[in-house]
Image (spheres, rainbow, N blue to C red):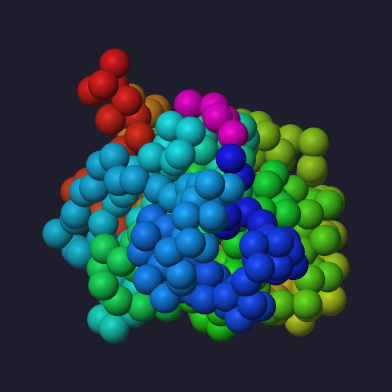
Amino acid sequence: MKDLHDITHGELLSVLEELGQPKFRAKQVEEWLWERGASSFDDMTNLPKTLRAALAERFTLGGVSQAARQQSADGSRKYLLRLADGASVECVGMPTGQRLAVCASTQAGCGMGCAFCATGASGLTRSLTAAEIYEQVMHVRDDFGTRVTSVVLMGQGEPFANYDATLAALRRLNSPDGLGIGARHLTVSTCGIIPQILRFAKEPEQFTLAVSLHSAVQKTRNLLMPGVKKWSLLNLYDAMGTYVDITGRRPTYEYALIRGVNDTDEELDHLVEFCRGNLAHVNLIQLNEVPGSKFQPSSEARAGEFVRRLGQVGVEATVRQSRGADIDAACGQLRQRVERRSS
């Protein structure tokens, strides 16, 4: 049976008409789906029992179940969620004062193969539906019992390899009939799939774009990010210029500092030249240490030097302190731990 989350508003109206129900029932059903997060048709208490039974005969409610949950001393919570077909994804809730940020996944696993990423080592299982992306955010909201103020699609998977579902999830998160999160507080992080960056630039909403750069030296980037080898840094540079021209918005470049790999003076010089004169923000990431990985994080002093040099050419750079250092915070770590335990 089809998941009720996956039908359009028009399709829902047709189903309700077929069942002899008035049109206003559609809004009631959608409130249960997208705002209240109903896990059972029986939860939909303002619908007639006959309608609930009829819907249950035709549809499932999909949903996610919690397979594991970890809480960090800094308040962050990491979740491994099981989907209806048994696939699993990770998401994270990160509270700061009155704000709650969620990092959600767009795929189960990832096919990009980034060398420093625990998810990349596992490969791609499948892409998620828009509802499965959305329901991760709902799960975190309900667990914290507070409103989600921002979402980054920066968990497992490459969002632009699942473009249509990613965009549909963003629109639902932004909608007043969904979670009502402002478009500028909804961020997509891509490894740099150029055709989809150019497509994203033409979308009417003011969603935020982040690009995982990790090196402005082609040889190093190919080593770290083999999944985007076919899109060169030169072409990425041109595409980002087009994105800024069309949108007027400042993109973010994600740069995980890896000791002796992309934190050398040569690497810094190339990064400065890549960003010089462009509208950009550089988000320097203190790499999470992944057991068995050959990569180690750079020192705080080295991160500070990157900030200083970029600032000299007018490019704002900040160092993002990794949250959840005392739990399996890096993408894919919790999933790997649970799967090892169960095998």
Residue at 19% x, 56% y: name it: 72
| Residue 35 screen position, x and y as percent | 45, 73
Q: Which residues are magenta?
A: 121-126
| Image quadrant containing the C terminus | top left
Q: Is residue 87 above or below residue 173?
A: above
Would residue 129 be visible to someone looking at this image? yes
Dividing the picture into quarters, in which one does residue 24 lie? bottom right
| Residue 50 screen position, x and y as percent | 48, 61
Q: Is residue 27 above or below residue 301?
A: below
Residue at 48% x, 26% y: name it: 122
Residue at 71% x, 39% y: name it: 228
Magenta segment includes 27:
no
Dividing the picture into quarters, in which one does residue 149 lie? bottom left
| Image quadrant containing the N terminus | top right
Q: Is residue 178 left or right of 45 when viewed as pictured?
A: right
Between 110 and 283, the one nearer to me in the picture:
110
Q: Is residue 250 above or below residue 330?
A: below
Q: Is residue 23 above or below residue 304?
A: below
Q: Is residue 182 left or right of 36 when viewed as pictured?
A: right
| Residue 299 screen position, x and y as percent | 33, 51
How many numbered discs, if any? 0
Residue at 26% x, 81% y: name it: 97
Outermost left residue: 73
